[in-house]
Image (cartoon, helix red, strand yellow):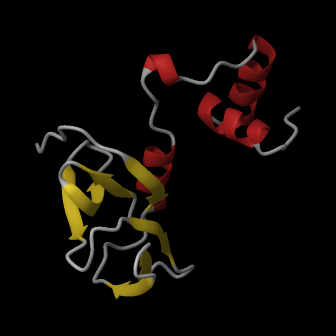
Amino acid sequence: MKVLKQISPDNIVITPWGNLMFAEDGPDGNRVIGITPEGEVYDFAYNRISDSEFCGPTFSPDGYTLFLNIQSPGLTFAIWGPFGQRNTGRQRQMGHAAPPRNFATKLSLEMSEIARRSGISELEAAALLRHGVKLT
């Protein structure tokens, strides 16, 4: 497994096939990195055009096109796969990965119980609450 020395992730997206992908600027350069739910890390792209960072990785609704920007000189790329097939199970697994304990969301006992009854994780409940969704 690849070990990341120091990372400065920006613009994180969950891929249609269930990996986490993010733009990163740091001592190893401006690049896009992927991480599988199993914790395997891989380089996806390096910026060899400028010293500017990547930003805004996002996928088209059908999951076949990755859009990626370079801040300066202000370029947008449309990247076509082949990518992995859509895998909602792996997306859900990655979307529910628990953060380190010191970053973990703190919910009231009542909200924790509502999350359990609703069949969602506490992390999902916290995200919904943050976006103004009322849970009952």
Query: Which of the image's four quarters has the N terminus?
Result: top left
Residue placed farthest to the top in the image?
109
In the image, what residue occupies the spot 39% across and 85% down?
77
Relative vertical location of residue 24 with respect to residue 49 in this rendering, above or below: above
Instruction: Tell me residue 9's x, y (percent).
Output: 38, 49
Q: Quadrant of residue 51?
A: bottom left
In the image, what residue occupies the spot 65% across and 18% down?
106
Q: Nearer the viewer, residue 3 or 95?
A: 3
Query: Which of the image's four quarters has the C terminus?
Result: top right
Instruction: Tell me residue 46's x, y (percent).
Output: 21, 69
Q: Quadrant of residue 43?
A: bottom left
How many marks are shown on the rendered structure? Answer: 0
Q: Is residue 120 left or right of residue 50?
A: right
Residue 57 appears anywhere in the view: yes
Q: Is residue 128 left or right of residue 37?
A: right
Q: Nearer the viewer, residue 74 or 106?
A: 74
Relative vertical location of residue 19 with respect to residue 66 in this rendering, above or below: above
Relative vertical location of residue 53 with respect to residue 104 in this rendering, above or below: below
Instruction: Tell me residue 70's x, y (percent).
Output: 39, 75
Instruction: Tell me residue 72's x, y (percent).
Output: 41, 76
Q: Is residue 75 left or right of residue 103?
A: left
Q: Quadrant of residue 23?
A: bottom left
Residue 19 appears anywhere in the view: no
In the image, what residue occupies the spot 23% across and 67% down?
44
Residue placed farthest to the left in the image?
1
In the image, what residue occupies the spot 49% across and 75% down?
59
Relative vertical location of residue 78 with respect to residue 129 in this rendering, above or below: below
